[in-house]
Image (cartoon, rainbow, N blue to C red):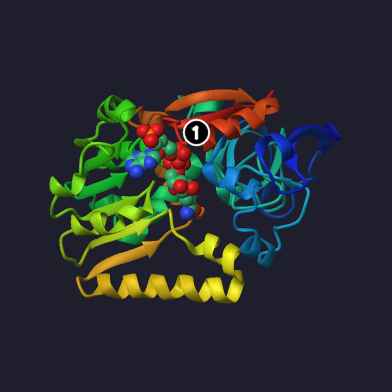
Amino acid sequence: MKRAMQAVRISGFGSAEDVLEYADVPVPRPPGKGEVLVRLRATSVNPIDCRRRGGYGRALLRLRGIGGFPQILGSDISGEVVAVGPGVSELQAGDAVFGAKSPSIHGTYAQYCLVKAAEVVRKPASLSFAEAAALPYAFLSAWAGLTDAGFRAEAATGRRVFLQGGTGGTGVVTLQVCRALGAHVAVTAGPQGIDLCRRLGANEVFDYRTQDFSRHLDRYDFAICLADQSEEAKMISILRPGPGTGYATLVHPLMSLVDAKGLLRGGIQAVRIFLRERSSQKRHRRAYAWSLFRPDRAALELLAELAEKGTVQAVIDRAYPLSAMAEAHEYSESGRAKGKIVIEIE
Ligand SMILES: NC(=O)c1ccc[n+]([C@@H]2O[C@H](COP(=O)([O-])OP(=O)(O)OC[C@H]3O[C@@H](n4cnc5c(N)ncnc54)[C@H](OP(=O)(O)O)[C@@H]3O)[C@@H](O)[C@H]2O)c1
């Protein structure tokens, strides 16, 4: 086993060009109980990586003990297991795996990464490492939103789902999964993303720059915000009354309020906004959630199964080598990506 590996780390907050450093760093220690060491072949850039690089969420991350430097960012795991820790029976060295790692200062912008065995499953053989890196974090985040809104895989047939932002990394995979499960899916996209959303199976596609989806859609079961929280009222207006319906957003002000106003003032303000909105939806017997990425092995297995069948495909906008991370971050921050920005790791 090598002692040093290539990784991209940050030692302070700032712009992509200023703080992303491609460097030789020590290979992680051998895996402990319930962990595996993965030789990464690919990962991806998620918008949260760029925000964390700029200091977003620092107060809450510090509280969780993951705010120190140097940090290696990155969540998507796609590679081969090289060593397993005590208590890991379902995986062995040589297995190709994919998954997503919870926030950490030892992330996946690296040749090797320690991960919890529960956070990865076998990579479908039909996916390349780059394709497998494009799916897990984005999907599991949106799946957390769908689940919090009340969506269930086993009861998805015929349910009407609105996804605001069909072309982002989260949108392209979630749209395909919802369609594969039998849901009717409407999405919004920019003009260059309309054809892509149709190709991925969306039943209805609205150009968010020129069309108001809320004038065309009614009595939907679920609405998930994957792009712009300022449209929350419109998204909620297309929902039928519950039970069994709901709204969830991945784009909420919790972290930014805490960053701006401190843990106490920011936290209290966030909780107040959340409780006010939730109680207003309760009157209509609808769920209301601010969702966050969370590991979900059953959902990861569902994703693997659908990818293996070919009903869910990776949509890669651009691929960069690990050494070009600053360019990859800048492209992600442009907000123009259609699908995912993948990082290939030699
Ligand atoms: N809470 C969490 O744990 C969590 C987890 C994952 C993601 N997120 C957040 O969820 C959001 C989506 O993530 P992502 O990975 O999908 O981002 P992304 O890949 O950067 O999404 C970019 C896409 O969004 C589209 N878009 C922008 N504004 C839009 C609008 N108003 N309506 C419809 N589409 C719009 C863009 O289309 P155009 O180029 O045509 O504008 C572009 O295709 C981000 O804000 C991210 O930070 C949160």
**Relative depth, front residue between 213 and 5:** 213
> Does the residue tagged 1 have its C-beta within 8 Å of any atom of ligand 1?
no
* Residue closest to the far right: 3
Residue density around tag 1, few if under 14, some if 14–19, many if 20 or more, within 10 Å: many
User: Do we see residue 90 in this rendering?
Assistant: no
Residue found 72% across the figure and 52% down from its top: 86
Q: Position of residue 275 (x, y in %)?
A: 38, 75
Q: Position of residue 150 (x, y in %)?
A: 29, 60
On the rendered image, what quadrant is the C terminus found in?
Answer: top right
Picture quarter containing residue 152? bottom left
The kind of residue on which mark 1 rests is Ala
Residue found 41% across the figure and 30% down from its top: 338
**Relative depth, front residue between 210 and 217:** 210
- Relative to 229, 208 lies left or right: left
Specify the quarter for ligand 1. Answer: top left
Q: Position of residue 240 (x, y in %)?
A: 15, 60
On the rendered image, what quadrant is the N terminus found in?
Answer: top right
In this rendering, the answer to whether 268 lies above or below 42 is below
Residue found 31% across the figure and 45% down from its top: 164
Picture quarter containing residue 3? top right
**Relative depth, front residue between 17 and 199:** 17
Q: Position of residue 269 (x, y in %)?
A: 48, 73
Mark 1 = which residue?
A: 134
Residue found 32% across the figure and 65% down from its top: 288
In this rendering, the answer to whether 71 lies above or below 128 is below
